[in-house]
């Protein structure tokens, strides 16, 4: 929300390394190939069950180039992507039924209680400071209508450790030092070269943050479950019948509290009272 008052807070800006990382354009393909499809199809499977009937106004904050916006619009949502990266806005805005604009989750340009659903599938990854995440979640809670839904994605605390164990990076001493630090603190910095400035959550931590923003937590869902760590998952995703069976299996333990943290990503659903 713009303001010209001298006392007004400056508009939030994204750290340059985060903007640089996304300006490379990786989000266009990340979920369309390989194991990224597991994240896409599982997110779709979960959202179709937890969101209200399509037809309302949906803000996809941090929607990148619109990989989710595209199917959400086809399902009947009036989708608005809000993202700080110009390339993302350009790509998402070209999709049928999707509008897109530049913006930041910490200062949404929507009226109070004016939208049915707010998706935060990514912005919270890049807000390492708790106060900034609180600002983001309070904004989401402000713009969603009473009874409306906010869905927050987080990366699980030990996802980098498990990923690098799987890929062999753990056995490189310099990377091991970084992974131990990330598992202890949740913080990722851009110097590792694989990702950018990020924060990795514990499942109970994000649930508490969503509640602290005034939302009622109605569920938590591991997106990939343990399956992202299995060998041969790509072949399973390539085969339509096997993929359906895989999705069926992952629904069984998706909200099992003892397994939430094994997934790479987690969805936490909040409803505005
Ligand atoms: C990992 S991508 C996720 C993209 C997509 N939502 C998905 O689920 O695949 C993170 C997205 O969050 C956006 N982002 C980062 N910081 C943000 C902020 N402060 N406000 C809004 N979006 C932000 C990035 O530009 C990027 O598009």
Image (cartoon, rainbow, N blue to C red):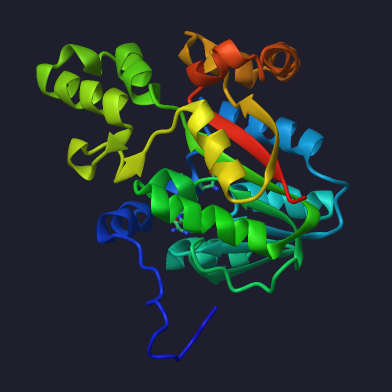
Q: Position of residue 157 (x, y in %)?
A: 40, 26
Residue 85 visible? The answer is yes
- Give the mark count: 0
Query: Residue 107: image x %, image y %?
Result: 51, 68
Screen quadrant of the N terminus: bottom right
Residue 212 in percent (x, y) is at 57, 46
Vertical relation: 222 (above or below) 63 = above
> Among all residues in the image, which is located at the extreme left?
174
User: Residue at coordinates 62% horizontally, 66% vertically from top-left?
Assistant: 94
User: In the picture, residue 200 is in which quadrant?
Assistant: top left
Query: From the viewer's perspective, is residue 94 above or below residue 75?
Result: below
For image coordinates 40% across by 77% down, the residue present is: 9
Instruction: Pick whichever, 91 or 199, lies toward us.
Output: 199
Quadrant of res 167: top left
| In the foreground, 159 or 169 | 159
Direction from residue 111 to residue 223 in the image, left or right: left
Q: Classify residue 52 as left or right of residue 208.
A: right
Counting from the top left corner in percent of width and height, residue 154 is at 50, 37
* x 84%, y 46%: residue: 52
Residue 62 in view (yes/no): no
Horizontal side of residue 158 vs 169, given as left or right = right
């Amino acid at each position: 929300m713009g303001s010209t008052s001298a006392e007004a807070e400056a508009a939030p800006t994204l750290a340059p390394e985060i903007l640089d990382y996304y300006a490379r354009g990786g989000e266009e393909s990340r979920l369309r190939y390989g194991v990224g499809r597991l994240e896409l199809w599982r997110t779709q499977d979960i959202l179709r069950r937890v969101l209200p009937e399509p037809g309302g106004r949906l803000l996809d904050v941090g929607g990148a180039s619109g990989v989710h916006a595209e199917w959400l619009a086809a399902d009947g949502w009036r989708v608005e992507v809000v993202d700080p990266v110009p390339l993302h806005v350009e790509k998402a805005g070209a999709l049928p039924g999707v509008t897109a604009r530049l913006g930041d989750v910490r200062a949404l340009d929507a009226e109070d209680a004016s939208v049915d659903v707010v998706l935060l599938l990514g912005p919270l990854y890049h807000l390492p400071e708790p106060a900034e995440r609180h600002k983001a979640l309070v904004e989401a809670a402000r713009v969603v209508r009473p009874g409306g839904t906010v869905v927050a994605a987080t990366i699980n605390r030990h996802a980098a450790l498990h990923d690098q164990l799987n890929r062999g990076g753990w056995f490189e001493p310099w990377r091991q030092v970084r992974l131990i630090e990330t598992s202890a603190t949740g913080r990722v910095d851009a110097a590792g070269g694989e990702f950018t400035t990020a924060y990795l959550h514990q499942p109970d931590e994000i649930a508490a943050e969503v509640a602290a923003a005034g939302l009622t937590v109605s569920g938590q869902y591991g997106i990939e479950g343990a399956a992202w760590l299995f060998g041969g998952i790509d072949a399973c995703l390539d085969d339509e019948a096997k993929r359906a069976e895989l999705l069926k299996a992952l629904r069984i333990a998706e909200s099992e509290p003892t397994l939430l943290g094994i997934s790479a990503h987690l969805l936490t659903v909040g409803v505005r009272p």
